Amino acid sequence: MILSGDAIAAGVAAGDIVINPFDPAHLEPNSYGFHLGDEILSYSDPVLEPNRTPTVIRHLIGPNGMLLEPNRCYLGSTYEQMGSHWHAATLYANRSVSTLGLWIHYSAPLGHSGATIVWTLEMMVARRLRIYRRMPIGKIAFWTLAGRTATYRGRYMESKTTIPSRFWQDSPSDSPDRRLSPLAKGG
């Protein structure tokens, strides 16, 4: 069951939901509107190898914004730290951003219970688009859990900023010729 805006506010007041900073003006009927953080990451490797640490370039978003180009993957982050030990969460772009052709979280929208973090956003644009730090960019919805509650303990648990892929950690070694683990191969 999805929480209403009033239930999200009550969860924040009770300490069951973390949204920091929290502003009741950003509550929506079934979600909370969050903002873009201050930096964007882009990959500089000509070919990304999932079994190697990717090389990234960090871009601080200046007062004149940052121009995003089509057909490139950018990583941004939420300005707010958000999550809950008692609810799962899903992240979505807000409609106004989506209708500009900006996808902010197109393949991994689920936030596990226990993850109260600054969320990394997977960003791609349909055409050239300028973005600005702290602009309203998305919404987070919280969901009631059924069954035993488990806490997320994954590799992104301590996220305080934008984090590139850590898929390479599935392999036991960082050598150039290492093989993907059976889990990464789908085994």
Image (cartoon, helix red, strand yellow):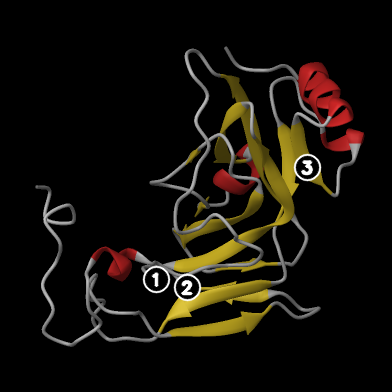
Q: Residues within 10 Å of mark 1 (few under 14, many from 20)?
A: few
**CB-based contact (under 8 Å), mark 1 and mark 2:** yes
State the CA–CA distance, disc 1 to disc 2.
Answer: 6 Å
Which residue is disc 2 drawn over?
69
The reply to whether residue 25 is in sight is yes
- Residue 158: percent from the left, percent from the top? 60, 60
Q: Earlier in the sequence, mark 3 or mark 2?
A: 3
In the picture shown, does residue 67 fall above or below 145?
Answer: below
Residue type at tag 1: Arg
Give the spatial CA distance, label 1 vs label 3: 30 Å
Q: Which residue is mark 3?
A: 19
N-terminal-most mark, 1 or 3: 3
Of the pair 140 and 98, the residue shown nearer to us:
140
Figure quadrant of the N terminus: top right
Q: Few, some or many C-alpha atoms within 10 Å of disc 3 (few <14, some 14-19, many ≥20)? A: many
User: Which amino acid lies under the numbered mark 2 shown in the image of this protein?
Assistant: Glu
Q: Is residue 31 left or right of residue 22?
A: left
Q: Residue at x 49, y 30 (%)?
A: 150
Query: Mark 1 = which residue?
Result: 72
CA distance separating discs 3 and 2: 31 Å
> Element under label 3?
strand
